[in-house]
Amino acid sequence: MSPSLGLAFCYTNLAGSAILQQRAEVRRLDAQFRFRVPTGTGADGFTFGVFDVPYHLGASGGYLGCYDNTGTLAGLYPSFAVEFDMYQGGTSGETNENHVAVHRNYGINNYVGAGPSTYVPSFDMEDGNWAYVRISFDNGLISVWMNQTGFNFGPGDLLIDQLDVGDVDVNGNGRFDPFFGYFGFTAGTGGSLYNQIIIDNFMLNVIPEPSSLALGWIGLGSLLWLARRGARPIG
């Protein structure tokens, strides 16, 4: 049986993270996993992202355990995350409670693309069934596939197509440049909650330049073993 990662257990206003402790170059990567929410109509959701430190933990609720609510991190440190948001609220301008978005630099309103609710899966992420996800990143361009049938993704499963994340490395030149970071998941609950968000079958392949450190294919067992839960001081 594949090991599972439980996020956002049965408590309100909770934030959690599970982050690999091995640092690697962020240039090209391919990740896949599946998730399900056994009990729907809760809040708020989770992210898969790249963080500048191995112990990041953001705020709860609509901040999804990823984003900064103090002003001490947002826009200042290299990071980006794909959010799976199942509650309307948090990001300014959200129009539905079932969407996927890409945010950068720990800012809840620093979304990439036309709007925070532009990318809507063809299914309800809270329906209790497994949702299968593939995320591909190639030198600043991110793509996301989703379905409920398995890891054999087809053209109809492409939800986000080569979205440019921009200057996530915050060097001020307006474009993506490779940086070193840590990979993992975050989640948050608010006044409403889930019993938990279950993630399994996680695989990550980080593809560096020949002179850089490679993570290779890493499974969820490694993530669970290497994960550390904690918070950097952001207040």
Image (cartoon, rainbow, N blue to C red):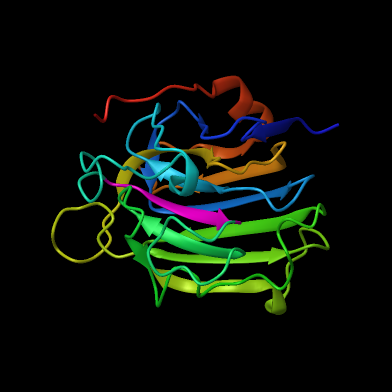
The reply, left or right, for residue 43 in relation to residue 81 is right
Image quarter of residue 201: top right
Magenta span contains residue 188 = no
Which of the two residues, 165 or 66, is positioned nearer the viewer here?
A: 66
For the record, the magenta segment spans 78-86
* Residue depicted at 25% across the width and 51% down the height: 169
The residue nearer to you, when weighing 13 against 227, is 13
Decide: is 201 above or below 162: above
The number of numbered discs placed on residues in the rendered structure image is 0
| Image position, residue 210 (x, y; %) | 39, 46
Where in the figure is residue 25, as x and y percent of width and height? 37, 43
* Residue drawn at the location 51% of the way across and 39% of the way down: 186
Residue at (78% x, 46% y) in the render = 39
In the image, is 39 to the left or to the right of 29? right
Q: Is residue 69 left or right of residue 91?
A: left
Whether 20 is drawn above or below 33: the answer is above
In magenta segment, residue 82:
yes
Task: Using the image, determine if residue 64 lies above or below residue 1.
Answer: below
**Residue 80, percent across and down?**
38, 52
| Drawn side of residue 53 relative to residue 89, left or right | left
- Observer-nearest of 144 and 69: 69
